Image (cartoon, grey):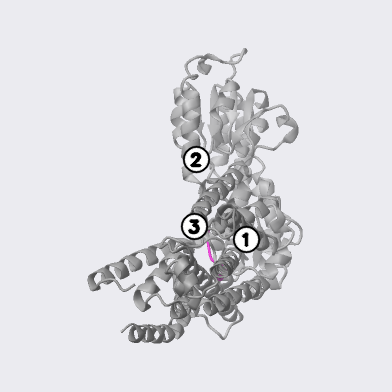
Amino acid sequence: MYRHRLKPRPEFMFRMLTALILLLCGGCGDLDHPSSDIGADGEPRVISLAPNLTEMIIAIGAGDQLVGRSSACDYPAAALKNVPVVGGFGEPSMEVLLAQRPTLIVDVALADQSLQHRLRQAGLRREHIPCTRLDEIPAALRQLGRLLQREETARTLAGELEDELTRLRRQSARIPDVHRPLVFAEVWAEPLMTVGRNSYISECIRLAGGRNLGDENDTEYYYLSHERVVERNPDVILLLYMAEEKVADRIATRIGWESVNAVRNRRIHDELDPDLIMRPGPRVLQGIAQMRQAIVNQDSPAAKERSP
Amino acid sequence: MTVRRSTRFFLILAGSIPVVLALCLLTGSAGIPDLGTVTGHAILRMRLYRTLAALVVGSGLAASGTVLQALLRNPLAEPYVLGISSGGALGAATAILMGLGMVSIFAVPIAAFVGATLTLTLVYMLAGEQGIPSVHQLILSGVIVGAVVSSVLMFLISIAPTRGIHNVMWWMLGDLTVTSRPLLWAAMALTGTGLIVTWTLSQSFNAMTLGRDMAHHLGVRTGRTLLLGLAMATLMAAAAVSLAGIIGFVGLVVPHTVRRIIGPDHRRLIPGAALSGGLFLALCDTAARTIMAPRELPVGVMTALLGGPFFLAVLRRNRERGPLT
């Protein structure tokens, strides 16, 4: 759920909460210095505050070092069953977090910047691992491999991912823009939100043979008007959120959208797994594959281009 | 003087309707729509519905504010003060977080409506344990109930999953995109009813602004006027909230501005405020969707940014001329 850091949040409430947490933790921080708590075998005790990093940690075989996760970290479920939840995505509860005696915290973004100082005060190492571009995913795998002493596995995994991305890029470069369907990636319905040029999802759409409608905006995610979507007239609509049944039908009844190509040709796709696409993690290639199935019409020139 | 001034005001208002409508329909991220194409037709249709929604919501909020200011004899009265808006937001948030929005497209608006109405009923009951509540008691219990309702809302947000928060925030920012036609028609009917009923009560409102005792001696059935007025103000505010979420400032600024210009007679004030409120919100919405196009700004930001300075200017000009009311 990478729209997370963009959503408007109740700032005031959050500051109050932070102040409260600070009050509660201020005194107890010095009593038991968690920094001295290296696991018995000298391996770090890591807490992941982002679902994609959790997936990576499991993928490189460092699941045994994971002592905490965010509530958004839900995959792979079997491996995470016994890993306690320490708070929300990027916003842990300091008390629960400290109780796990971690030595390393990894995150893609913290909900509150003061958290960084509090983690440092508690003597914890915090690694910020951004994943906003596709190329940062293999890099993140390698970094986690170094931090968690699983370099070998991580390097192999990252290498495979990079090779596949290179192959996809080469393949995609052969498709001229005129043969690419215009894709509207709906990240959220109310308010209407999509991905901009600086999102790795925009890269994914391109690799999947499409053209992202949101590329006209150079942010990661942004709100836009219904009018703009109707005006640009996308050929394909991808719904990137968990939706109930028939949401595709509901989109077809939106005022004005009946003129959109994707609606007229029934190319609204709500069958994609949002977790595969919205998480820049080890499963991102599956996400791209799902997108390609949705985007590339089998008898379009782009499809012929792909199968020489 | 006042009569001439208000006639001029209504003439200007009437004259500006086509201008505002043209502005609303012809501007937007897509520019002037090309009616030769299907897309152009679709865009024009979308803008038409959106403008209609702005007119309904804006006039409802402004009229609601006017009535509340008269009944409560308090310049700060508006749908927010009596907790109506927060109640509506709480209803909507509960429905969203329970996942009712996915069950039916009407679930959230209806919940907002129920929340707003229940809140006002609660405020009214708390304020007047014996018979008809006093104005001070009403405002006091309204502020307190509103604060409690807001905290419950904050509580819900703090325990909600990220996805839910997103939808709730949308409610709290306000958005005039019409998601279903029947909802628009329903809001229009409710607002229309509220406008007509409150306009017929304008004489009583005029008396009520003098104080309840005075109104009573003038032959006004004060209890009935108070209850009916509050009910209609809630009806209009709730219709607005359920159609477009919470949009602040319109209910406060528009009635005051219009009162400064045409005077405090509710026979003219109610239609004047309703008309100006509708046009004002339509303009704000057009600005919100064009200024940073194709990005869209929350319309509540525009109502505050455009309404605030304008209101201050009117206040200042009046102070120089001497008080009108």
Q: Which SS class for mark 1?
A: helix
Using the image, tell me which numbered label, if any, was put on residue A14: 2
As drawn, is B232 to the left or to the right of B81? Answer: right
The answer to whether residue A242 is magenta is: no
Q: Amino acid at mark 1?
A: Thr
Q: Residue at x 56, y 31 (%)?
A: A93
Which structural element holds mark 3?
loop
Share a chain, discs 2 and 1?
A: no
From the image, state whether disc 3 or disc 2 is nearer to you: 3
Q: CA distance from mark 3 to mark 2?
A: 24 Å
Write down the region rendered in magenta: A223-227
- Judging by the rendered image, the residue that carries numbered circle 1 is B117
Q: Are marks 2 and 1 in contact (CB under 8 Å)?
A: no
Residue A250 coordinates in the image, percent (x, y): 71, 66
Chain hosting mark 2: A
Which is nearer the eye, A101 or A205?
A: A101
Q: Amino acid at mark 3?
A: Val
CB atoms of marks 3 and 1 within 8 Å: no
Marks 2/1: CA–CA distance:
30 Å
In the picture, residue A252 is in which quadrant? Answer: bottom right
Q: Dot 3 falls on which chain?
A: B
> Residue A2 in the image: x percent, y percent?
57, 46
Q: Residue at the location (44% across, 23% down)?
A: A121
The structure residue drawn at horizontal position 57% and vertical position 30%, both measured from the top left corner, is A144
* Mark found first going from the N terminus, 3 or 1: 3
- Judged from this view, the residue extending furthest toward the top is A40
Are discs 3 and 2 less than 8 Å apart at CB? no
- The quarter in which the N terminus of chain B is drawn is bottom left
| Residue assigned mark 3 | B81
Pick the residue in front: A228 or B120: B120
Task: From the viewer's side, name the closer residue of A195 and B126.
Answer: B126
Q: Residue at x 51, y 17 (%)?
A: A35
